Image (spheres, rainbow, N blue to C red):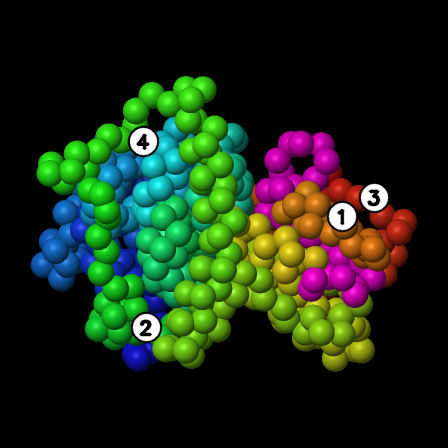
Amino acid sequence: MAVAAKTGNEAMAEAMRQINPDVVAAYPITPATEIVMIFAQFVADGLVDTEYVPVESEHSAMSACVGAASAGARVMTGTSSQGLAYMYEILPIAAALRLPIVMCEVNRAISGPINIHCDHSDTMAARDFGWIQMFSENAQEAYDNTLQAVRIAETVKLPTMATTDGFIISHCMERIETLEDDQVKDFIGEYKLTPSLLDIENPTTRGALDLQDYYFEHHVGVGEAMKGARSIIKSVAEDFNKKFGRKYDLIEGYKLEDAERVIVALGSTCGTLRAVIDELREKGAKVGLLKIRVFRPFPADEIAKALSNCRSVAVLDRVEPWSGVGSQTFVEVRSALFNLAKKPKLINYMYGLGGRDISLKELAGVYENLKKADSLQEVNYLGVGE
């Protein structure tokens, strides 16, 4: 195991080099450009034997991924924001065809107005397209999640995206531990799609018209696969921990055992929250963090169990979905708690849109507000100007 200083983009590109996929099809977009740019250099230098397909758009990139994956190739891509949005038409097709494409997605605000910085509006808007979604807290997790995504996708037979926060993780240098190439090769194993579209001895069809006769059944099949993905994600994480000593799960608690007030968050903000919680704990506050690492499938049972004994909960979400009833994570956490006999008071904070910084003081203020949660309105903004 080697120690290296890498940005989140470099960490993901290094993971891709070690995975050595059969096909990568991509179109560059800030702040994900570096991932495929660095990987393209690996291809040019002969460090991988990947077929790199430079295309004219993200729509074409995902279309090429679907074609290559249907033929039986191990396929990866990377994108962000409007690039992911331009793939939306093809994303559910990849899921419906049960193709284990792996995407390195760098979270970035969706236009408009035009903005190149981080929030989760792009990934959250794709949450209902049948892709497994994992959020990374830092560059180490971005590297580890990318490796695990291959095993998860190919076992579940669903496409999977590992995400990082744009510029916060993607371009900031951190110390990470990387595995040896042979360790990665052994961990992900070999992949062979059966049946392959190129198996002319046993011909099959992809993308056929599917009306009232079987469309419903195909969608139920994806839903059942997504349900089953939870145990497979946990199993892959356990094997990763057993082999390499880094532990992951669907959710992660930090000082949660005796916490009376809990903050729920995703992505890089969880690292800032750990520092805030440490400071508050030194002052005697019984506060904890619940980090959601896997958003799809949504770990509802695990979240309900983890929050069942606390008094009040703040759900932080880096997106404003314009629903009028709160952000995506808040709505799903509230649904997860619905059947609890004794529920904590739940409030929602939308924050950090378009890359706006979130400060230690603001996060500490969320805890202070949790003490008077009964008097707060249910849905709130944090850090918004007048």
> Which residue position holds label 4?
59
The CA span between labels 2 and 1 is 41 Å
| Sequence-first disc among 4 and 2 | 4
Q: For the residue marked with disc 4, what is the amino acid? A: His
Nearer the observer: mark 4 or 3; the answer is 4
Q: Which residues are magenta?
A: 305-328
Q: Which mark is residue 178?
A: 2
The span from disc 4 to disc 2 (Cα, nearest Å) is: 32 Å
Neighbours of disc 3 within 10 Å: few (<14), some (14-19), many (20+): few
Q: Amino acid at mark 2?
A: Thr
Residue at 45% across, 39% down = 221
Of mark 4 and mark 1, the one earlier in the sequence is 4
**Residue 220: horizontal and vertical position, in percent?**
49, 36
| Label 2 environment density (alpha carbons within 10 Å; few <14, some 14–19, many ≥20) | many
Please say if the residues under marks 4 and 1 sit with CB atoms less than 8 Å apart.
no
Q: Residue tagged by mark 3? A: 377
